[in-house]
Image (tube, rainbow, N blue to C red):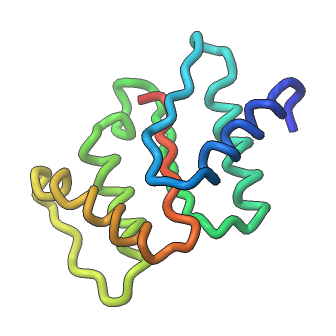
Amino acid sequence: CEIGFEKYYEHLSMQVSAAGPLPPLLVVGNPGSGKSLLMSKWLQLQEEKNSSSLLLYHFVGTPSSISADPIVMIRRLTAQLMQHVSTPPALTCDPLRLVEEFPRWLEKVSAKSSGGVILVLDSV
């Protein structure tokens, strides 16, 4: 664990283990303050725990990179969600349908996972 992050790891873990549905949790701080490091290390700890939750994450590079494109992000996350259902339909290329269907996929897969879905978007 990174020095000083333990209390944040505990807070994040308590937040996602609370009875839900839960509202989004926003982690904010100045550039370079360690938000990305905090989230990546916390995700690593969650994966090591063999959490019953499905962990989805998307780390955006620079604001001008393709990873910052919201449609690319939603398409990638939807494709990951679709891997958790038997015989998923073809992933649509229509951006409007992607945006419309993404919450449904989150809900569908979350209902199948005993720990729900934890979605981390970094640098949005």
In the displayed image of the protein, which residue is found farthest to the bottom? 87
Residue at screen point 73% across, 51% down: 44
Q: Quadrant of the C terminus?
A: top left
Query: Outermost residue toward the top?
Result: 30
Above or below, 114 against 16 in this view is below
Q: How many marks?
A: 0
The residue lying toward the viewer, choosing from 117 and 123, is 117
At 37% across and 88% down in the image, what residue appears? 86
Where 90 falls versus 124 (above or below)?
below
In this picture, residue 66 sits left or right of residue 115 = left
Estimate the x, y position of residue 20 in percent, counting from the top left: 49, 53
Choose between 32 and 119: the one closer to the eye. Answer: 119
Q: Horizontal and vertical percent for residue 65?
A: 37, 32
Residue 80, picture quadrant: bottom left
Q: Along the horizontal axis of the image, is 16 left or right of 72? A: right
Q: Position of residue 57 (x, y in %)?
A: 51, 49
Rendering quarter of residue 85: bottom left
Say left or right for 111 vs 71. Answer: right
> The N terminus lies in which quarter of the figure?
top right
Quadrant in the picture for residue 31? top right
Viewer-closest of 100 and 67: 100
Residue 52 percent location from the top left of the image: 64, 69
What residue do we see at 30% from left, 51% from top? Answer: 74
For the point 64% across and 53% down, which residue is it?
A: 17
* Vertical relation: 38 (above or below) 111: above
